[in-house]
Image (cartoon, rainbow, N blue to C red):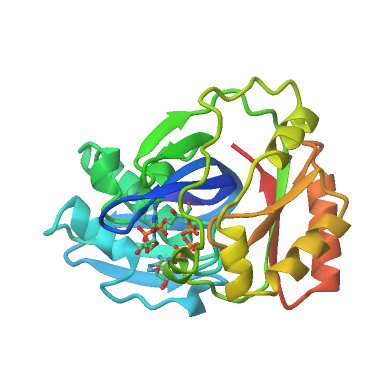
Amino acid sequence: MKIEEFAPAKVNLTLHVTGRRADGYHLLDSLVVFAGVGDRVTVEASDALSLTLAGPEAAGLVADRDNLVLKAARFFDPGFRARITLWKALPVASGIGGGSADAAATLRALSRLTGRPLPAPGEAATLGADVPACLRGRALRLRGIGELLEVVPRIPPFEILLVNPRVTVPTPSVFASLTERWNPAMNDDLPDWPDVTAFCAWLRRHRNDLSEPARRVAPVIDDVLALVRETGCLHAGMSGSGATCFGLYPADGSTAAAAEAFVRLRRPDWWSASGAVS
Ligand SMILES: C[C@@](CO)(OP(=O)(O)O)[C@H](O)COP(=O)(O)OP(=O)(O)OC[C@H]1O[C@@H](n2ccc(N)nc2=O)[C@H](O)[C@@H]1O
Ligand SMILES: Nc1ncnc2c1ncn2[C@@H]1O[C@H](COP(=O)(O)OP(=O)(O)O)[C@@H](O)[C@H]1O
């Protein structure tokens, strides 16, 4: 039996850093969505554990034991034997959780293959703070270091453009260069947004507290945001620790795709993708 799982890009539409734990991990309050753009993990039973890389972004990775796909497989069952293929479409170290998405897709695939349950969020977070959210793969409010999740059921439909300038931004460096670690959280109750315009107006009143340190690490982020804004999006921002930026568009099946074509024309050397959001 061959099982395929999609590993969608995670996008932090807001990211408030609200404190720091004694072990150095930061407390977050983030509204997270998943885009119809991502990697694919395929798993089939075999007599040995192996990983093959394919896809347009595979060159950014090696299939060694530190690959999050193999870490997730060993975490699920240290003796598990399977032939795993990772089709890599998301750029590595880009703030859209590609590695965490791959780990989560591997766990989902192995759970389907064996009928065994998925790990609890607190356990999954030991693979990576974003893995619990990626296991759910739908609009969420993420708190704690990433293990406290609440489904956000009423996000209005929209489409998204993702643009990465092909500069890798290591997450630890961005957290390390934060100057203010104790910032206000989002309000306890999230509103019911009547439409995407109201949703974007709400997003504009919130923050990504990692933007400033990320822009110090990778000043090109300002150019990415300027280009995304030039497409006429409803709202633009940076995801996670960067450098990927996003633009939001109405869910009309064409405006986000047209924005992607515009960006590709202007910056064929950058990575861009667009899709619907869940
Ligand atoms: C910042 C976020 C926001 O969603 O996304 P990315 O930019 O990575 O996509 C995540 O919290 C990243 O999650 P993930 O990439 O899984 O993080 P991990 O591998 O667990 O941690 C990488 C490093 O980031 C820092 N880190 C991560 C999460 C967190 N809540 N506090 C931290 O301080 C730590 O320095 C840690 O050593
Ligand atoms: N399957 C994987 N996909 C992406 N990165 C991986 C993977 N396995 C291990 N990594 C490592 O994890 C780190 C974070 O990568 P990634 O999850 O893409 O970052 P981000 O969460 O910022 O998008 C990188 O240094 C990368 O080498």
Task: Count how many numbered circles sit on residues in the image.
Answer: 0
Position in image of residue 41 (x %, y %): 41, 57
Q: Which of 38 and 232 is in front in this view?
A: 232
Q: Which of 211 and 95 is in front in this view?
A: 211
Please, which residue is most extreme toward the left here? 79
Give me the residue at 43% from left, 76% from top.
Answer: 61
Q: Nearer the viewer, residue 248 or 20?
A: 20
Position in image of residue 217 (x %, y %): 58, 74
Q: In which quarter of the image is the C terminus?
A: top right
Position in image of residue 250 (x %, y %): 80, 37
Give me the residue at 85% from left, 72% from top.
Answer: 266
Q: Is residue 227 left or right of residue 189?
A: right
Classify the position of ligand 2 by quadrant: top left, top right, bottom left or bottom right.
Answer: bottom left
Q: In this view, does 179 lie to the left or right of 200?
A: left
Does 224 appear above or below 125?
below
Give me the residue at 82% from left, 48% from top.
Answer: 233
Q: Nearer the viewer, residue 85 or 179?
A: 179
Residue 202 appears in the picture as rendered: yes
Residue 117 placement: quadrant = top left
Residue 193 placement: quadrant = top right
